[in-house]
Each structure stands twice: as structure tokens, then as C-alpha cells.
Amino acid sequence: MTAYQTISDKPALDIADRIPYLVRTFVALVGEWRRRSETRRALLAFGERDLRDIRLSRCDAENEASKPFWRE
């Protein structure tokens, strides 16, 4: 077996073939991080009544907002 073959005898992907996938994956990840950051910032702006409507306390909102953007 050569370095370019897998067990199933299909050619393995070159790094050049993987780049579009890697770029799409990275862009999606950055988008998710941004969405989390914006959502957590907006949560802090909620009033007490808004928080009660979504069944969260101020403490819950502050705990969620204090998480780093990369943590779910």
C-alpha cells in the first residue's frame, strides 16, 4: 500500500483537496462563536420581566454571559 492509498484502495485526499472543507468548517465555527457572543451579550440586556418570561434568573443570565464564546 502506498502513502496515497487507503485500505479500500481509494486514493486519499490531498491537503489541497481538503482546504475548501477546512475553510467552510472554520467559517462555520467562527460564525457559531459570534452568535454565542452576541446572544450572551443580549441576555445581559434583558429586564427582570423578560428573564422571568424565559424562566431565567438574573444570576442565570450572568452565569451564561460570563462563559467564553468558545464554550457551549
Image (tube, grey):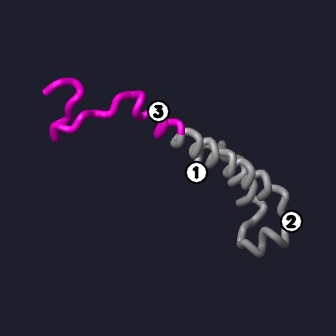
User: Which residue is drawn at the image coordinates 24% and 34% (left, top)?
Assistant: 11
Left or right: 49 as drawn, with respect to 11? right
Query: Closest to the observer: 1 or 42?
Result: 1
The kind of secondary structure element at disc 3 is helix
From the image, tell me which residue sits under label 1.
72
User: Which residue is drawn at the image coordinates 84% and 68% (left, top)?
Assistant: 48
From the image, tell me which residue sits under label 3.
19
Quadrant hosting residue 5 = top left
Specify start and end residues of the magenta stretch as a single range. 1-23
The N terminus lies in quadrant:
top left
Looking at the image, residue 40 lies above or below residue 17: below
Q: How far apart are marks 3 and 1 (CA)?
A: 26 Å
Q: What number is the disc on residue 47?
A: 2
Quadrant hosting residue 15 = top left
Badge 1 or badge 2: first in the primary sequence? 2
What amino acid type should be assigned to the residue bearing mark 1?
Glu
Query: Closest to the observer: 33 or 48?
Result: 33
